[in-house]
Image: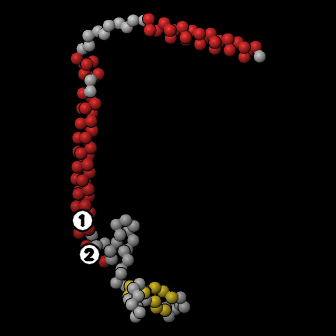
């Protein structure tokens, strides 16, 4: 209990000191401003912010243009590599997806059934096994 009372007394005394200091602050006079040099005037003006905004705009435009140039170069290299590949379209004459590396689906194998529905796939039986296989 004694510790609580001592802590309260300490806090009240600190509050009183802060109150007295705050009352005396308006009485303190500020020193007149000294003459600023050209660098201090430039830093305190709006000019650095304007320069920064202009530089950011220029940087944004130049980075976007660089991105376009790089994308065009990438497309031309991909086109050139596609010409160099065997049969001009990938491995073994089958088209290969650039993303997965797997052969693309050949839609010529998908036939239209007699009822006119698209998407029917021919199924044939293998003589060695009873399982149906998709052709």
* In this rendering, position of residue 113 left or right of residue 17: left
Element type at mark 2: helix
Mark nearest the camera among 2 and 1 is 1
Location of residue 88 with respect to 10 vertically, above or below: below
Q: Quadrant location of the C terminus? A: bottom left
Q: Position of residue 109 (x, y in %)?
A: 37, 85
- Looking at this rendering, what residue extends furthest in the right direction? 1
In the picture, measured across the screen, residue 5 lies left or right of residue 99, that is right
Please tell me which residue lies in front, 32 or 115: 32
Q: CA distance from mark 2 to mark 1?
A: 14 Å
Q: Residue at x 35, y 6 (%)?
A: 31
Label 2: how many Cα within 10 Å (few below 14, some 14–19, many 20+): few
Quadrant of the image occupied by residue 16: top right
Q: Position of residue 19 (x, y in %)?
A: 55, 11
Q: Which residue is mark 1?
A: 79
Instruction: Report which residue position mark 2 lands on.
Output: 87
Q: Nearer the viewer, residue 38 or 94?
A: 38
Which is more N-terminal, label 1 or label 2?
A: 1
Helix, strand or loop at disc 1? helix
- Percent from the top left, x then y, of residue 81? 26, 65
The foreground one among 122 and 103 is 122
Q: Give the colour scheme shown.
A: secondary structure
Whole-percent x, y for residue 22 in the image: 50, 11
């Amino acid at each position: 209990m004694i510790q609580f009372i001592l802590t309260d007394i300490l806090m009240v005394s600190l509050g009183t000191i802060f109150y007295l200091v705050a009352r005396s602050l308006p009485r303190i006079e500020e020193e007149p401003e000294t003459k600023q040099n050209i660098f201090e005037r430039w830093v305190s003006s709006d000019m650095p912010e304007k320069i920064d905004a202009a530089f950011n705009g220029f940087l944004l435009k130049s980075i976007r243009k660089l991105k376009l140039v790089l994308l065009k170069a990438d497309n031309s290299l991909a086109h050139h590599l596609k010409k160099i590949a065997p049969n001009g379209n990938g491995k073994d004459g089958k088209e290969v997806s650039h993303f997965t590396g797997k052969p693309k689906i050949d839609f010529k194998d998908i036939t239209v059934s007699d009822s006119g529905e698209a998407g029917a796939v021919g199924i044939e039986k293998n003589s060695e096994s009873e399982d149906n296989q998709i052709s």
